Image (tube, grey):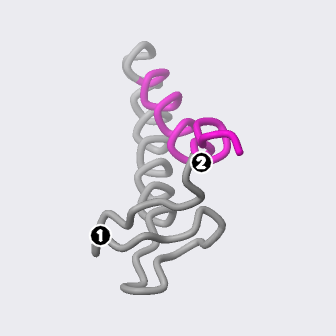
Amino acid sequence: MKPVYICSRCGEEISRTVDECPHCGYHPQSIVWRVGVGALIFGAAAALVFPPVGLIGIFAGVLAVGGSYLLSPAG
């Protein structure tokens, strides 16, 4: 397994250990985190009205916020 990722904004190779692309400054974790928090807020509000949809939103938010730790490749 190569120890690099490809930046989705500029296409350059970046190390797996950096938080942002040194070439263009793209920081994908911040975008994922904002989407995750939005899903958590939506899920909590929807859970009051329609619990199945709310629980799915909460689950999606938790996966998005903690997903970098839960779903990242090993190594």
Could you tell me the amino acid type at mark 1? Gly
Q: Residues within 10 Å of mark 2 (few under 14, many from 20)?
A: few
Would you say residue 68 sits in the magenta stretch? yes
Q: Secondary structure at mark 1?
A: loop
Give residue 35's position: percent from left, percent from top: 40, 52
| Quarter occupied by the C terminus | top right
Most common secondary structure along the magenta stretch: helix
Give residue 49's position: percent from left, percent from top: 38, 22
Would you say residue 69 sits in the magenta stretch? yes
The residue where tag 2 is placed is: 68
Could you tell me the amino acid type at mark 2? Ser
Residue range corresponding to the magenta coloring: 54-75
Q: Which mark is residue 11?
A: 1
Q: Is 21 in front, or is 42? A: 21
Give residue 52's position: percent from left, percent from top: 42, 13
Question: From this viewpoint, which residue is outermost toward the front?
Answer: 1
Q: Secondary structure at mark 2?
A: helix
Residue 56 found in image quarter: top left
Going 37% across and 67% down the picture, which residue do you hit? Answer: 7
Q: Which mark is residue 69?
A: none
